[in-house]
Amino acid sequence: MTLTLSNFGLRARDYLDRLNSCFSGVILEQIEVFAQDLQTAWIEGRQVYICGNGGSAANAMHMANDFHYGIAACGPGPKLPGLRVEALPANAGLITCLANDTGYANIYSHQLEVKGRPGDLLIVLSGSGNSPNVVKALETSKRMGLRSYAILAFSGGRCRDLADVPIHFQIDDMQIAEDTQLIVGHLCMQWLNSHKPDTLPHLN
């Protein structure tokens, strides 16, 4: 029996095919490097910061939740403390203060200047890669000695050149771009959850 897809079904199939096609072998290799860096940060007790705008800001908070709790307390194996992770868009009071007093372009870089330390990780989520506040966050992280990742789409923008490791999905679709951010986070979460360290030396 041949199933005839509706207009919605055809559009949904096209969307899912385009999403799936984003994950090339090169991209998966970059995500593996990302996951391994997160594992090292976990073992060594380094801080991880995540930022973005709009849907990417919401994804930053989702990812921070997964890395704080999901990698360590869920699933088989020992129940451990998770990553020391912070979603920089999460504090509305601080964001509105910095935006009002210093300008919206500084809402993430100012936080990094106060909290960041050499060896910490910065994860930037951006569709265009050109939003001034995430660009400035990457510039600040480079100056301070943080290691940076950027999960990007479209042309990758300025963030593609600034990040230590850009994970660039060549898709001109903002919804798929935001989907890729969460998929990258979930791929890392599940890998970390199945590769838990026996101990966390920095807690001893």
Image (tube, rainbow, N blue to C red):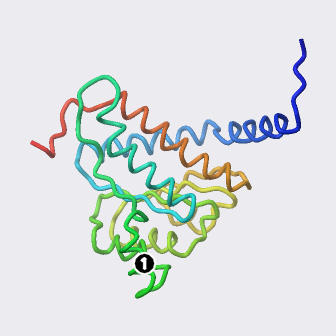
Find residue 102 and report its image quarter: bottom left
- Between residue 45 and residue 15, name the one nearer to us: 15
Going 55% across and 49% down the picture, which residue do you hit? Answer: 181
Could you tell me residue 204's position as x and y percent? 9, 42
Count of picture labels: 1
Picture layout, residue 135 above or below residue 97: above
Q: Position of residue 69 (x, y in %)?
A: 32, 41
Picture layout, residue 147 above or below residue 35: below
Residue 138, horizontal then vertical, whole percent: 46, 68
* Residue 23 located left or right of residue 193: right
Estimate how packed mark 1 is, as few (under 14), some (14 to 19) or many (20 or more) residues with alpha carbons within 10 Å.
some
Of residue 106 and residue 142, the one placed in the foreground of this image is 106
Per the image, the residue denoted by label 1 is 96
Quadrant, the N terminus: top right
State left or right for residue 113 relative to residue 190: left
Residue pictured at 44% horizontal, 79% vertical: 106
Residue 171's place in the image compared with 199, above or below, is: below
Residue ranking furthest to the top: 1
- In the rendered image, the residue lying farthest to the bottom is 101
Residue depicted at x 37% and y 77%:
110
Q: Callout 1, which amino acid?
A: Thr
Residue 13: which quarter of the image?
Answer: top right
What residue is drawn where x is 28% and y is 51%?
A: 84
Callout 1: helix, strand or loop?
Answer: helix
Is 155 on the left-hand or right-hand side of 144? right
Residue 20 percent coordinates (x, y): 68, 36
